[in-house]
Amino acid sequence: MTILVTGATGAVGRRLVATLLARGAAVRALTRKPDDADLPAGVEVVAGDLAAATTLGSQVFDGVDRAFLFPAEGVEAFVTAAVAHGVHRFTVLSSLAAAKEFQRDHGSASQLHHSAVEAAVTGRTDAWTILRPGTFANNLLSWAWQIRSGAPIRAPYLASAQAPIHEDDVAEAAAETLLSDDHLGAAIPLTGPQALTRSEQVAIIGEALEREVPLVEITPAEFRAETAQFIPEPVMKMLLDYWHDTLTVPDVPRPVTVVTGRPGRTLAEWAADHRADFEPA
């Protein structure tokens, strides 16, 4: 059994590849730049683009039993090619927004994108598992340049509370769904183990660095003005709506334990794992 991993050079994909190899699986990794992949020995690396059908031939799919689908733009081309080559089993990386549990999710940038990715698979096969993580702890890396330089983090809604998930927990959940049949047909919400305010999240990073990280609360309007050149408007609206709503209704933890059988990693563990990302060069 060969498992095909897309998005193999990303934060989740790299950990997934390593986990599958450690558990004895044969792994093929799809990447646009094989020479730059830097993946572990034992991985078969093949060139291909999820959105370019002409790159998705038999060299990608021969011998593949199942695939991990990273939610890139244009994945319909990949799914069509995979099914045509006899691949019918998929684990899909999606987003909790696709569940549309909250009004803010309906029509949001994340919901529209990830719902389309899910439909690309569920419309072609019944053998799927969908993983719907909430906010990733890795999103906090957007503060890395301020923390490295000593500049204060300027952020709105500091009392809002989210439950960021460690990318390693998502990867391990994906490995479980690819190596067993226990979760076929399930769409599984996943978050970190604890809802923490944004102030608490910054403090936890500071504890990992053994120094205080300065933090200044600004208004949503100030945040929009300071970051509009970097954040597209649909994403801006999604973020502000999410932080606003979680002021009064914090994220409800959805433990990864239901898939992995192990407690989810804390934000303190994530911060320790990523300490080098926040240290001055």
Image (cartoon, rainbow, N blue to C red):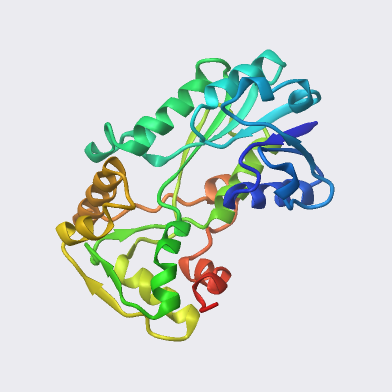
Quadrant housing the N terminus: top right
Left of 172 or right of it: where is 101? left
User: Where does the image place residue 278, in percent across and percent down from the top left?
Assistant: 49, 73
Relative to 186, residue 192 above or below? below
Residue 250 in which image quadrant: bottom left
Q: Residue at x 34, y 78 (%)?
A: 151
User: Where does the image place residue 65, in percent across and percent down from the top left?
Assistant: 74, 26
User: Where does the image place residue 40, in percent across and percent down from the top left?
Assistant: 78, 52
Q: Residue at x 58, y 17 (%)?
A: 125
Left of 65 or right of it: where is 259? left
User: Where does the image place residue 3, in percent across and percent down from the top left?
Assistant: 73, 34
Q: Residue at x 44, y 68 (%)?
A: 144
Relative to 237, residue 74 above or below? above
In the foreground, 93 or 48 = 48
Q: Residue at x 41, y 61 (%)?
A: 142
Residue 182, can we see it?
no
